[in-house]
């Protein structure tokens, strides 16, 4: 039996993971499930899968969780330290599917106990890629990518000589505003941004797809995960979301990974790795699809992509600052404190202000430094959003 923990079990990736596990429950033992505000979902899944521990991120919801689990014998806990405790419980496979930088510390804990970490939480790689890889190396643990593009690259590289890789191309759907005129973007609302043409995902990543911050994070994630120089990594808009990534080799060949936009493929690949087992995803009818199209990923339309290049060039804590500023600016957009186009303006301004002070970005990537940079970037983002309102 494979011992499984799911960090972020109540979210979109977490629920897709449980969908796969629920199809063969006899093969898995669920150690811990974690969630946030959705206590009913967390408790129901903990009961259904016989988890030993259920953790909510919010300490003020602990008594609700205890009530929801009463009589089940399932242990309940709450707060950031309890999330780390869940990740530390011995398990063979841990899904990292918390959204945001909050996923970093529990993911590191899972690596430190030697578990295989299925990494949906791209923010961990963006903020602290070298720390993640070093923890995996030191504890003989493995990190498997779950982001669809990175799973696609990983699969295209199986059996290949990595020194023969000339370029990696990750695809972007273009998000909710792909076909909107530029001048209308300033008035886009959170509700409009939170609809996705192809993928069914959590609210925050869906809005990040509309702003292309998701792709910006993924460019950085590609650099960190596969150890590639930034100039070998490209993004292209592919509205159909059927090709997830392509790897170009020095003989000119491009190996593409093609499949329906269903995260259960990347999750299932990581769950069964190194085996390839049957998965309940649609089989594509290429003739019915007819064609795949591509457009440039324009850095004027999507300044997040330009900022990602700057972050990759800067290195150090730039990724942590970039991500935290984006998380805070996204909060500001969701609270209607700033407009859609101002998300990128806030992030750029935070990067500019922190770059002006030696030591804020050009420092070693330690967990303390990443946490400090994350905090400072959020404070600066709030300052900038307050200035914008005047
Ligand atoms: P989601 O919002 O649907 O779920 C997030 C999960 O994290 C929930 O369980 C929530 O309770 C928990 N959570 C939220 N804030 C938390 C905090 N501060 N501390 C601890 N737990 C917290 O998000 P999602 O779409 O499932 O995405 C999860 C991660 O996977 C993100 O990093 C996202 O970028 C990545 N990802 C998602 C998809 C997708 O299809 N949804 C695809 C690729 C990558
Ligand atoms: Mg992705």
Image: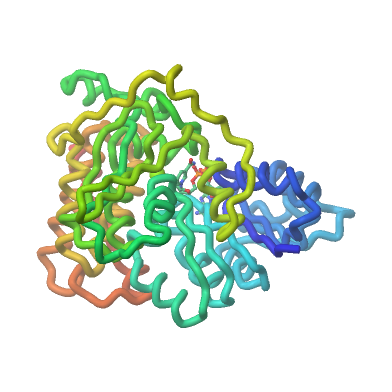
Whether residue 93 appears in this view of the structure is yes
Q: Measured along the vertical axis of the image, is residue 17 above or below residue 187? A: below
Which residue is rendered at x = 51% and y = 79% of the image?
Answer: 140
Residue found 76% across the figure and 60% down from its top:
29
Q: In the rendered image, which quarter contains the N terminus?
A: bottom right
Residue located at (63% from left, 49% from top):
277
Where is residue 150 shown, x and y percent of the image? Answer: 39, 51
Q: Quadrant of residue 92?
A: bottom right
Q: Is residue 113 above or below residue 24?
A: below
- Direction from residue 363 to residue 171 in the image, left or right: right
- Give the x, y percent position of residue 370: 33, 69
Q: Of residues 274 and 316, which is closer to you in this image?
A: 274
Q: Give the image location of residue 37, x and y in percent.
A: 61, 45
In front here: 275 or 65? 275
Residue found at the far front of this picture: 251
Indicate the quadrant where residue 85 lies.
bottom right
Q: Is residue 106 left or right of residue 88?
A: left
Q: How is the image coloured?
A: rainbow
Which residue is at the front of the view, 24 or 288? 288
Residue drawn 45% across and 64% down? 104
Report the residue that reaches farthest toward the left. Answer: 356
In this figure, what is the number of numbered marks?
0
Q: Position of residue 297 (x, y in %)?
A: 20, 36
């Amino acid at each position: 039996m494979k011992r499984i923990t799911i960090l972020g079990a109540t979210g979109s990736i977490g629920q897709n993971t449980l969908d796969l596990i629920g199809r063969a429950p006899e093969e898995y033992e669920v150690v811990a499930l974690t969630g946030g505000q959705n206590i009913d979902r967390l408790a129901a899944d903990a009961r259904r899968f016989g988890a030993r521990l259920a953790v909510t991120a919010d300490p003020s919801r602990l008594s609700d969780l205890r009530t929801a689990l009463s009589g089940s014998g399932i242990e309940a806990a709450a707060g950031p330290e309890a999330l780390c405790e869940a990740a530390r419980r011995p398990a063979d496979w841990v899904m990292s599917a918390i959204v945001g930088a909050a996923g970093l510390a529990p993911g590191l804990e899972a690596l430190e106990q030697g578990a295989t970490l299925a990494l949906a939480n791209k923010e961990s790689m963006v903020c602290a890629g070298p720390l993640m890889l070093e923890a995996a190396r030191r504890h003989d643990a493995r990190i498997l990518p779950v982001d669809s593009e990175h799973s696609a690259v990983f699969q295209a590289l199986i059996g290949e000589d990595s020194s023969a890789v000339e370029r990696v191309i990750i695809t972007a759907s273009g998000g909710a505003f792909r076909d909107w005129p530029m001048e209308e973007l300033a008035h886009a609302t959170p509700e409009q941004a939170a609809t996705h043409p192809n993928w069914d995902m959590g609210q925050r990543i869906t809005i990040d797809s509309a702003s292309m911050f998701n792709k910006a994070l993924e460019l950085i994630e590609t650099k960190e995960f596969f150890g590639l120089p930034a100039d070998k990594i490209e993004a292209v808009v592919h509205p159909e979301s059927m090709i997830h990534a392509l790897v170009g080799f020095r003989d000119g060949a491009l190996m593409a990974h093609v499949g329906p936009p269903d995260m259960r493929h990347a999750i299932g690949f990581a769950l069964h790795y190194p085996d390839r087992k049957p998965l309940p995803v649609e089989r594509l009818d290429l003739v019915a699809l007819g064609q795949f199209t591509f457009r440039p990923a324009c850095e004027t339309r999507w300044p997040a992509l330009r900022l990602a290049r700057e972050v990759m060039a800067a290195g150090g804590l730039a990724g942590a600052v970039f991500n935290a500023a984006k998380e805070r600016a996204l909060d500001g957009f969701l609270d209607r404190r700033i407009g859609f186009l101002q998300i990128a303006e806030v992030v750029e301004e935070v990067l500019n202000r922190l770059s002006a002070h030696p030591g804020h970005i050009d420092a070693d990537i330690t967990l303390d430094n990443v946490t400090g940079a994350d905090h400072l970037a959020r404070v600066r983002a709030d300052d900038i959003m307050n200035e914008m309102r005047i």
